[in-house]
Image (tube, grey):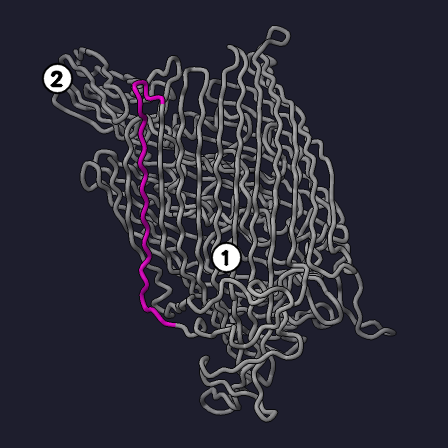
Amino acid sequence: MATAKKFTQLIFSATFVCLSVHSYAQSIKGRVTDATTGEPLVGATVVLKGASAKAIVKLDGSFHFKNLQPGDYELVATYTGYSTSKAGPFHLKSSTDNVEVDIPAKPTSSDLSGVTVVGAGKNEDASARRLEQKSYQLVNILSSKTLQLLPDITVANALQRVSGVTVEKSSSGEGRYPIIRGMDKRYINTLVNNIKIPSPDNKSRFIPLDLFPSELLERLEVSKSLTPSMEGDAIGGTINLVMKDAPATKLFQVNVGGGYNNIFNDQPFQSFSASTMNKQSPNQIHGAAYAANESEFPLGHLNYQSKSAPINTNAGISIGNRFGKNKNLGVILSGSFQDQYRGTATSVFTTATTPNVDDIPSFEYLRERKYSTHTQRIGATGKVDYHFNNRNKISLFSTYVHLDDKQVRSSIDTTNAINQTLSYSSRTTWQYQSIYNTTLQGEHQVTDNSKLDWSAAYSIAKNSIPDLTAFTHGGLSVDRTGPKVNLVGDDILSAMTRSWMQNSDKDVSFYANYTHDTKLLNRAFEWKGGALYRNKNRDNFYNYYNLNPLRTGGSNQLFTTVDNAKFTFIGSDATAQLNGNNYTFREIITAAYLQGKWQLAKQLEALGGLRVEHTYQHYNTQLPPTADYKEGTITYTDFLPSLQLKYQLHYNQALRFAYYKAVARPQFSELIPDGPDNYELFKERGNPEGLQHSTANNFDLRYEFFPGKADQLLLGVFYKKIDDPIELSVRRFGYNSQVFQPVNIGTAATNYGFEAVFIKYIGSFGISANYTYTHSRITNDSMLYKYRDPKLGITDKYVAETRPMQGQANHIGNLSLLYKNPKSGTDFQVAVVYTGERLAILNTYAGLHYWLQPTTQVDLSFEQRLFDKLTCYGKIVNLTNTPTITSMHQSYNNYLQKTNVPLSQQTDTDNRIIVQKDYYKTSFLFGFRYKL
């Protein structure tokens, strides 16, 4: 933190100097910009003829020659991908002569009979600011240059740098799902090049964005309002991954790096061989009625090997160019490979099925868990485009991402009681996921005032978790009577579970849009209409086997080693039972829209219209024919109006208003009358009895100011009213069990807040900051409260509870301090992310929800040019070893007084009970990048 403080002081000192110093000697200063976009050409070389001096253009596009002698001077600016530009001659006479000049540089481009192909500069921050300024909807954009310099290497982690976005982490500490302005991942959709892609998640629609290496992207867009031409299932917003496009000139870039996570200084990395894990269950191989035998369940993958210091590796390559006499053909190929070892140290108190009287929580176990996760991430993208002439263009792009996770979870479980017992459990998980998309697109200028664009896309997402294995042994008593803690008794082998989960999701989609420019009441008017058809087919497979320890002579089997453990089936356990987790799901979305963009006045533009989406869904499970909700058909139609108003206060200032209506469809598994058994805490179960899709009316008002080409100030407020919101809740099921189940919370939910974004560059220094305040409220009148009734004794009653929406944090902030010196080729960034307290898991009992406490994460990244085309880089994540802490809004002191069962790791004892801590430590990555 001392280093960060000194760096902050340096930033403000340099800023003061830049603002206060005046030139009293002769000087020539100015800016070098892209003649087409106006963005600064950072790193361009400016030669001053007449003085044999040169300067490198700074972060804000500026250069400055000081203390010049009287005489004649000329400026010559050069930059890769641009024609040489000149300015002058200038004649300096007196000692107070000062010249300011802007030098616009033209990109080297090819005129394809009227079609200009320009590639240089589109990856820079200024290009992102220009797109934000010109877009129809409210949008925040990260350019590929920003993504390259961030400490993050995946799209999911990069998203936490966008205003209003928080990221939900997996058990390995890797960012996975975004939450936009307090709206959970279920309220967000994800696109690749504006095409919706399917999810490999085994239950849900949302995309695990840790699949995507960020280096494959040209830019990352987060839209916070919708137009009629955009798909309507995005109450929270839309994330669009724009993949790399063909460059204007030859591109060759390669990077390679290595790193380490220092959590392995404290715990070894545990690995296993997947060679004994069967990719298919006995049921899949031999048929549904097959009775498995014990020999088909080998135990080799439960023998773990330890690694003391595993090394992470990272590599990427991009190759692209344009070909032909007029550069009509553009091609680009990009690939990425990431091999990472991550560890997590977790302490978690698990609750009993029901609480004590007055909803005082009851804890059963303290589980000390160690996670070791080996992740291999592969990404590839390619695009070919061909310009027939200035009126017709066709393109084909494909994207493939693959994530392979192998994880060991070792746990020591201690009963939370006066007479404690201890047991050990292990879980071995191998999961591999992939997404493939290929899209053919065409753009045609039908007439001078009309154009047609279309897309035909095929996508498939796959997920497989073969032979997930978990077993437990223990039952030892904890003796604390002596000077040392002793374990007393026999270590007894318990049951072993083996499960297989597989699913695939195929999409065939067609899009068509027609645009016509005309006039209405003598003012420019553009109307646009289009349609969408998507046929989705999803299948889900789930098998579960329960094996019990082999008993000899009626005695319990003692545990010695994994290899000596013997298991057997009891009764019908050898036959995988039919269940609702095996199902097929078909969904057909048809949509049409009509929108108009009208220049109402010189400074006022309106864009509005109506989108209509029809949803058809049909599912069929393997449950017996007599089972309730074995299969079902669901249909509904939504009318989704929207309006965008933009009032241009000045050429670089605007006031925007946005309204749109949107939907959120239930996840696939939420409509199925079953669910996976206990994976982390609770069994999951769908809710086909009456779960409705959500709808919302959304309002935004935003002020925009773009004072410089890469500078920005955004101030906005938003309001959302969500009808039939869906949230996951721990609910009582049967007499003494709990399930994790989706429910429509009875009343409409509201979500409103304030958002600010500030980006400013002064010379070589810059600051990028954003802050979002979010306030949501939802009331559930079906919460349980356990109490003692004078007549009935201990019983439950329903009470109402008002709380925030799941996943919503009141305060979200980002601060990045930047230094860029083009002359020395230095880029340096310190990034701080603050995420306020947010609701993580709902409980069916009032006041017993799990909350994630506020976190502050400090990261650092840098790049340094070594030679003309070679740079070294570094990325350091979680410098301060910030843990993730989960708690209940209950007084620990009150709990202890009522139960007399103490809990460890408690701090704020008056206000909360800490139930879980996750530590990930600090990760380091260093490497080299070569760019031709």
Q: Is residue 456 above or below residue 308?
A: above
Please, what is the three-letter code of the amino acid marked with disc 2?
A: Gly
Extent of the magenta region:
305-328
Q: Is residue 670 above or below residue 592?
A: below
Which residue is the extreme one toward the top? 522
Which residue is the extreme one toward the front? 286
Q: Quadrant of residue 784?
A: bottom right
Give the side of residue 823 with respect to residue 778, left or right.
Answer: left
Is label 2 in a helix, a strand or a loop? loop
Q: Is residue 258 above or below residue 761?
A: below
Mark 1, other Cα within 10 Å: few <14 / some 14–19 / many ≥20: few
Camera-nearest residue between 843 and 869: 869
Please, what is the three-letter code of the amino acid marked with disc 1?
A: Ser
Camera-nearest residue between 283 and 586: 283
- Measuring from the top left, give residue 507's x and y in whole percent: 57, 41
Residue position for label 1? 170
Residue 50 tag number? 2
- Residue placed at 73% from the left, 52% from the top? 631
